[in-house]
Amino acid sequence: MSVHKTVVITGASQGIGAGLVKSFLDKGWNVVGTSRRITETSLFNRARRIELIDGDVADPDTAERVTQRALEQFGSVDALVNNAGIFVTKPFLEYTVDDFRRLSATNVEGFIHFTKHAIQQMLRQRSGGSIVTITSSLTDHPIKQVTASVPMITKGGLNAITKSLALEFAADNIRVNAVSPGVVDTPLHAKNPKDFLKTLSPMGTITAVQEIVDGVVYLTESSNITGEVLHVDNGAHLGKW
């Protein structure tokens, strides 16, 4: 992979996002990472080809600032990973409209802001590009014990727009894919009992962050794959078990 390629990663300060930053750096990419307080992190070697920008993805200004920094420092935007997202479970009747608006602002509006900027820049460069979004296996295959109906409106929408954009920009060699995880060993589940989490897939295992990262890197670098929703979920998308 050319050292001149640049990837923008949202939600990059911990969990899957931090794993993505490290793996793309190791593969020779320039990395521009953003999250609300990413400049406070000590996880990354600042001597490498990395730029960190604080910001809320729900704010349109964040995507503009991040894209601008990528161009100023590295001269291009060749890939985007829409990793930032929020997730909250509760019975459907307990969700509020404010819950939905908060979920939508981060998960959907954040996607729109960053993806628009990335595609506009990729079209200017005329060299194609890759967009990969983190969604969820619960979108199409709910689990009775995990009541996440309202968040899945947002994640299911991301799966749908992934396919639409893949077709819309196929002739421009801009590929648009998604990775659909199940339960991943991230800070999100730090307080959840591991024995319970293992029951949420037929393989009875919890996915390591690196497995999701590897799926994202694979799709980013696979020049013939577009419109794909790749399940990395220990079989949870297969149905009842």
Image (cartoon, helix red, strand yellow):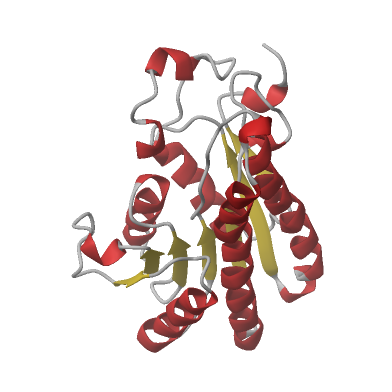
Quarter-wise, where is residue 93 in the image?
top right
In the depicted structure, whether residue 202 falls above or below residue 67: above
- Examine the image and state in which quarter residue 235 appears: top right
Along the viewing direction, whichever of 95 and 10 lies nearer the viewer: 95
User: Residue 224 placed where, x, y %?
Assistant: 69, 57
* Quadrant that contains the N terminus: bottom left
Residue 45, position as x, y percentages in the image: 20, 62
Q: Residue at x 30, y 62 (%)?
A: 38
Q: Residue at x 37, y 44 (%)?
A: 15
Residue 166 visible to an observer of this rendering: yes
Residue 127 rendering spot, x and y as whole percentages: 62, 79
Question: How many numbered discs sit on the rendered protein?
Answer: 0
Q: The C terminus lies in which quarter of the figure?
A: top right
Most foreground residue, 47 or 196 = 196
Looking at the picture, tell me which residue is in the foreground, 68 or 77: 68
Res. 129 in view: no
State the residue at coordinates (53%, 44%): 215
Horizontal and vertical percent for residue 43?
22, 54
Residue in view at x 81 percent, y 63 percent? 167
